[in-house]
Each structure stands twice: as structure tokens, then as C-alpha cells.
Amino acid sequence: MSDEVIIRELVGLDQTMAIFPLYSQVSRLSQAVVCQRHSAMFAQSNYRCIAAYIDERMVGASGFWTGTQLWCGKYIEADNVVVDSAVRGQGIGGKMMAWIEAEAERTECAVVRIAMVLGRERTHQFYARNGYFDDGLLMVKALTRISQSKGCIG
């Protein structure tokens, strides 16, 4: 078995839904909801997804968005970076973030950003080790009880 991590972009909904078993390690969302949300995200034309493989076994995945905002210009935002619990701590998350950062450079983005749920200290430490710093606060307000029951709020 090789320890080489290969990062590949997943194309389309079918390939992207292959991340569901991995994603289900960290989320309670059903496969139907994940599929519905990925469909809506792809429809916006600014969402992409990558996966990390060791010997053709998916061991990590992350989506990412490209956009433009007044405060920073063009950006990439990583979305739901997940590494298989069996191989966490082996640098796979860092390799996926490096791939996303290289894509941001290639597409002339000014920043790479990440939003994460408060209280996940290990996640915060991971990003800090990889050169990310706190530069703001994202605040959310659930508009209905339905949004809370469908997993919109951490």
C-alpha cells in the first residue's frame, strides 16, 4: 500500500456524491439531503469539489466556492473539509488545502477563506497551523425552525 496522497477534482453530481460515506462521519444529514444540496450548489456555477485518495480509496474531500466581495475582491472559500477518521493527523487535510490554495493562485484570487463552527478547537488549530488567522466573525440567524431541523445550524 502506498502512502501517496493524490488529489483529484470531482466532476458532476454523481462523482461528488461519492463523498457521502466520508461526509457521514461528521454529519447527520441524509444522503437525499446531501444530494439535494449538492444539486443546488452546482446549479450556482461557482461550486467545485475535490477528493484525496490513497491507493484509490477516498480519504478526504472538500468543496469550495469562488466568489467576489467588496472587502476582498475575488476569493475561494473551502467548504466542509473532511478527512477519514482512520487517517486524520497524516497531513491529508493540509494537502487538500494546499491544492485549493494553488487553485486560488491560479485563478487570481486575493484570499482563501474558511468558515467553521465555533467550539471545534482541533479544527481551529489545524487552520492556524496552515497559516490561517481570525479576521472576522460570521454570524447567522435561523429564519425558521425548519432550517434548524434540516441541519442549517451547527
Image (cartoon, rainbow, N blue to C red):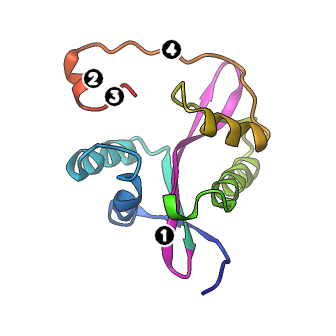
Please tell me which residue lies in front, 100 or 30.
30
Residue 108, image quadrant: top right
Residue 22, image quadrant: bottom left
Give the quarter of the figure containing the N terminus. bottom right
> How many angstroms separate mark 3 from mark 4 (CA)?
13 Å
Few, some or many residues within 10 Å of mark 1 (<14, 14–19, 20+): some
Query: In this picture, is 87 found above or below 94?
Result: below
At which x and y percent is residue 91?
69, 60
Q: Residue at x 50, y 58 (%)?
A: 85
Residue placed under numbered mark 2 in the picture: 148
Label 3 close to label 2 by CB (< 8 Å): yes
Give the quarter of the figure containing the C terminus. top left
Residue placed under numbered mark 3 in the picture: 152
Label 1 close to label 3 by CB (< 8 Å): no
Write down the region rendered in magenta: 54-83
Residue placed under numbered mark 4 in the picture: 139
- In the image, is 15 to the left or to the right of 94? left
- In the image, is 45 to the left or to the right of 78? left
Q: Amino acid at mark 2?
A: Gln
Please tell me which residue lies in front, 28 or 95.
28
Residue 84 visible somewhere in the drawing:
no
